């Protein structure tokens, strides 16, 4: 495993921040080399715009099943490392401390890719070689919403066709149980802008000049009440209700309220408590509307008496199957107009639909059972994650079941300073992928008709 960790550290040292267009060519070249060094084939797709999409292919060994193909989805881009002052180590100088590897992208998503490639290398050295065909789709824009991925999947649908897919992420919870998901929430990420003047003004003119910041805050306040109910008409349109089986699965998921409060240092009780709602149900089945950021006026040290000319808000709506991000955008615009805020501009930054695999597909059960065998602990499999990614377009174009699992842990801090994975989890993830691939073909012999929720 030493070589695998060394290769991962080299990969992590590349500052592949898609939001800042950093190190894209170098990272693509590194990933291609990693695949080709273990006898894989690659094609770099870039003619449709955006950062290149990497196709990787490994043929089944001489004793493998060449009629079955597993697809891995990963991304090579990472989040910006800021705020840098909150890192204990340089985010792009991978550092191992007490069995943990610290670096930006360690858990999201570079560690998972290297674990999968290492598993393939190990299987190639077993008698008969790889037990099935393996494909990779590795993109470079996941952290900015995968804006250019759909055209590649549409054009190269046959190239990426497979029987099932392992998604990019996953990890262990606070009780060391590996947590996996068979779907993902969608997103409508909006930016609201209120302009009140051409220049910032002295705050004294607030006696007779409207304040863009106050106006934006007042507009936001009409969209959600004190009980955290979303008040935008049309927001809940089209929602596909979960099945009774999915409800039962979610009701049995582990949830430790005190652990959550301790993990995040929460200052108030969970918002579901006052409404008598199970947090697990809310996390998986309920859409959300979150103010992610507010920007207006002076926010530096000390005082500056200013009436700001402009105010902006970032609004993140997590969606469930059946919701359409474009309909959410239209509904928010209509809501603001109805309440007299037609001067506030609303722009969609990222829109993705939710996706949920058929929970009864034998591939879902196979990934679950192989994880139990490797980790020798309870395994958690949820119908969908609370987060978002481009899973819907995979289901739409490729029509295949998807399970997400990875090498993270409860303290990985993905997207935050001091992101990390534990070396032991990285090794366990390699073993799990090897076990899963070894039993993949036989698991699909009982294949059922796919009924993924993808609209």
Image (spheres, rainbow, N blue to C red):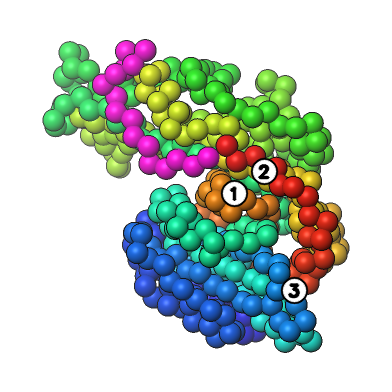
Mark in front: 2 vs 3: 3
Query: In this figure, which residue is indicated by the disc labeled 3?
Result: 65
How many other residues sit within 10 Å of disc 1, few (<14), some (14-19) or many (≥20)?
Answer: many
Q: Are marks 2 and 1 in contact (CB under 8 Å)?
A: yes
Q: Residue placed at 43% from the left, 71% from the top?
A: 44
Q: Position of residue 385 (x, y in %)?
A: 64, 45
Whether residue 340 is in magenta: the answer is yes
Earlier-in-chain disc, 2 versus 3: 3
Nearest the viewer among 351 and 59 is 59
Query: In this figure, which residue is indicated by the disc labeled 1?
Result: 395
Q: Position of residue 335 (x, y in %)?
A: 40, 18
In the picture, the quarter occupied by the C terminus is: top right
* Mark 2 vs mark 1, CA separation in Å: 7 Å
Q: Is residue 257 above or below residue 87?
A: above
Q: Position of residue 23 (x, y in %)?
A: 37, 70
Q: Residue placed at 58% from the left, 54% from the top?
A: 398
Determine whether the residue tagged by mark 1 lies in a helix, strand or loop. Answer: helix
Mark in front: 3 vs 1: 3
Q: Which residues are magenta?
A: 337-353
Rendered image quadrant of residue 239: top right
Left or right placement of residue 404 versus residue 203 in this view: right
* Mark 3 vs mark 1, CA separation in Å: 24 Å
Query: In this figure, which residue is indicated by the disc labeled 2?
Result: 452
Whether residue 358 is in magenta: the answer is no
* Mark 2 vs mark 3, CA separation in Å: 25 Å
Earlier-in-chain disc, 3 versus 1: 3
Determine whether the residue tagged by mark 2 lies in a helix, strand or loop. Answer: loop
How many other residues sit within 10 Å of disc 3, few (<14), some (14-19) or many (≥20)?
Answer: some
Q: Is residue 354 above or below residue 214?
A: below
Q: Residue placed at 43% from the left, 23% from the top?
A: 331
């Amino acid at each position: 495993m030493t070589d695998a960790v060394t290769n991962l550290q080299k990969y992590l040292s590349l500052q592949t921040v898609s939001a800042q267009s950093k190190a894209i060519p170098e990272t693509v070249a590194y990933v291609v080399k990693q695949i080709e060094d273990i006898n894989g084939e690659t094609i770099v797709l870039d003619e449709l715009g955006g950062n290149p999409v990497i196709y990787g292919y490994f043929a089944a060994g001489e004793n493998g099943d060449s009629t079955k193909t597993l697809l891995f989805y990963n991304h090579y881009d990472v989040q910006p490392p800021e705020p840098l002052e909150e890192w204990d180590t340089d985010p792009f100088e991978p550092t191992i401390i007490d069995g943990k590897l610290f670096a930006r992208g360690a858990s999201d998503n570079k560690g998972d890719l290297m674990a999968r490639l290492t598993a393939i290398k190990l299987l190639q050295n077993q008698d008969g070689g790889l037990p099935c065909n393996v494909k990779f789709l590795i993109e470079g824009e996941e952290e900015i919403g995968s804006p250019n991925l759909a055209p590649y999947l549409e054009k190269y649908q046959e190239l990426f066709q497979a029987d099932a897919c392992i998604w990019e992420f996953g990890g262990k919870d606070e009780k060391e149980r590996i947590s996996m998901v068979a779907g993902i929430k969608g997103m409508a990420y909006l930016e609201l802008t209120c302009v009140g003047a051409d220049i910032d003004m002295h705050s004294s003119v607030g006696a007779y000049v409207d304040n863009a910041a106050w106006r934006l805050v007042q507009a936001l306040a009409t969209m959600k009440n004190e009980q955290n109910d979303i008040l935008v008409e049309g927001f809940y349109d089209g929602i596909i209700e979960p099945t009774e089986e999915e409800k039962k699965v979610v009701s049995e998921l582990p949830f430790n309220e005190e652990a959550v409060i301790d993990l995040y240092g929460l200052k108030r009780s969970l918002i579901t408590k006052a409404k008598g709602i199970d947090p697990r149900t809310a996390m998986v089945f309920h859409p959300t509307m979150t103010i992610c950021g507010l920007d207006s006026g002076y926010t530096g040290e000390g005082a500056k008496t200013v009436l700001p000319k402009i105010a902006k808000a970032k609004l993140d709506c997590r969606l469930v199957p059946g919701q359409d991000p474009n309909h959410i955008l239209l509904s928010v615009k209509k809501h603001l107009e109805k309440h007299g805020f037609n001067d506030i501009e609303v722009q969609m930054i990222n829109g993705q639909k939710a996706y949920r695999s058929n929970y009864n597909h034998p591939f879902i059960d196979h990934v679950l059972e192989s994880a139990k065998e490797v980790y020798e602990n309870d395994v958690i499999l949820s119908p969908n994650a609370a987060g978002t990614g481009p899973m819907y377009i995979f289901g739409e174009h490729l029509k295949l079941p998807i399970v997400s699992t990875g090498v993270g842990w409860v303290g990985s801090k993905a997207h935050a300073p001091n992101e990390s994975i534990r070396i032991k989890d990285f090794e366990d993830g390699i073993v799990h992928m090897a076990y899963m691939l070894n039993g993949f073909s036989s698991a699909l012999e009982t294949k059922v008709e796919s009924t993924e929720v993808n609209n």
